[in-house]
Image (cartoon, grey):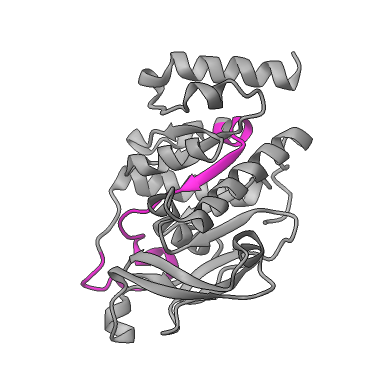
């Protein structure tokens, strides 16, 4: 069976099994494209993620986290072309060696177990595209050995919840290249952010107040980006954020066309 035929078959099966498997799939026009990449969305929290991936040309596949969901991870690594880690509650600070601040609202057990295993496996065992949004960006950093500011208001004396603010990007970053700008306004709903940066990552955007707003891999050949804002909520009105999502889906499409993407267990990270 050729790769193209296999992908068409898998997409058809996903449609048929959507209600059983917990999947949300794209519009008919997206499904009709033989090269439409399959984008896993870990733990659906808002349908705006599904709509944004669909609009960017991908086939969104929502990954269930019931009872941890970890037994399916190897299958996801092989079958999906890209992974989106969405926003949500907080990672237990014990994951980066700290006591829990009073403002922390922990993820549910099933989602925590699933996303911890999935994020680490995706980073370490594949070179496929990964986009982290808000909590997803924090997962990328913690899964890579980094730590977080547990509560921005307590440490910075400011709030990043329910407001808009500017971000300033590093001019040489992949993210700035995608967006075509080094300063613009974003939405903001978070109370945590990156503190110490994880292995094979770099900080590429900050708010003018100094809070980290985006990170990316140091590997120039890979699409692995985490942003603290919510681009999925800003499209279709903000073309710049639509460009980010299209670049992510395009990277997944390109990767699936040239390689299987799953590395051996001895392969290096990022």
Is 102 one of the magenta-colored residues?
Answer: yes
Judging depth in this view, the residue of 139 and 244 nearest the camera is 244
In percent of width and height, residue 261 lies at 71, 39
Which residue is at 62% across, 24% downward? 33
Report the residue that reaches farthest toward the right.
Answer: 258
Q: In which image quadrant can residue 126 be found?
A: top right
Which residue is at 66% across, 69% downward? 173
Which residue is at 32% across, 44% downward? 45
In percent of width and height, residue 121 lies at 57, 46
Q: Can you say whether 244 is above or below 165 in the image? A: above
Report the label total: 0
Is 167 one of the magenta-colored residues?
Answer: no
Which residue is at 33% across, 53% downward? 88
> Would you say 16 lies left or right of 243 here?
left
In percent of width and height, residue 266 lies at 73, 48
Magenta region: 76-104
Judging depth in this view, the residue of 134 and 154 nearest the camera is 134
On-image quarter of the C terminus? bottom right
In percent of width and height, residue 254 lies at 72, 40
On-image quarter of the N terminus? top right
Q: Is residue 23 visible?
A: yes
> Would you say 126 lies left or right of 139 here?
right
Report the residue that reaches farthest toward the left.
Answer: 102
Q: Is residue 146 visible?
A: no
């Amino acid at each position: 069976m050729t790769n193209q035929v296999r992908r068409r078959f898998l997409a058809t099966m996903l449609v048929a099994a959507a209600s059983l498997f917990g999947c949300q799939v794209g519009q008919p026009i997206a499904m009709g494209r033989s090269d439409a990449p399959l984008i896993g969305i870990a733990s659906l929290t808002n349908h705006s993620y599904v709509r944004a991936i669909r609009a960017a040309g991908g086939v969104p596949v929502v990954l269930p986290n019931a009872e941890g969901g970890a037994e399916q991870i190897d299958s996801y690594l092989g079958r999906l072309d890209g992974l989106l880690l969405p926003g949500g509650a907080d990672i237990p600070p014990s994951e980066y060696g700290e006591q829990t601040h009073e403002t922390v609202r922990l993820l549910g057990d099933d989602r925590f177990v699933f996303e911890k295993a999935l994020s680490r496996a995706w980073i370490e065992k594949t070179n496929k595209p990964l986009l982290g949004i808000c909590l997803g960006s924090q997962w990328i950093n913690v899964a890579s050995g980094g730590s977080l500011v547990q509560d921005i208001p307590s440490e910075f004396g400011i709030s990043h919840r329910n407001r808009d603010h500017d971000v300033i990007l590093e001019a040489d970053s992949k993210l700035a290249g995608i967006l075509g700008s080094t300063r613009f306004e974003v939405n903001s709903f978070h109370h945590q952010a990156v503190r110490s940066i994880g292995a094979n990552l770099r900080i590429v955007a900050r708010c003018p107040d100094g809070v980290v707003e985006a990170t990316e891999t140091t590997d120039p050949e890979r699409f692995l980006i985490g942003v603290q804002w919510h681009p999925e909520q800003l499209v279709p009105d903000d073309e710049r954020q639509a460009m980010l999502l299209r670049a992510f889906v395009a990277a997944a499409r390109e990767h699936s066309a040239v390689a299987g993407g799953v590395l051996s267990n001895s392969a290096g990270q990022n």
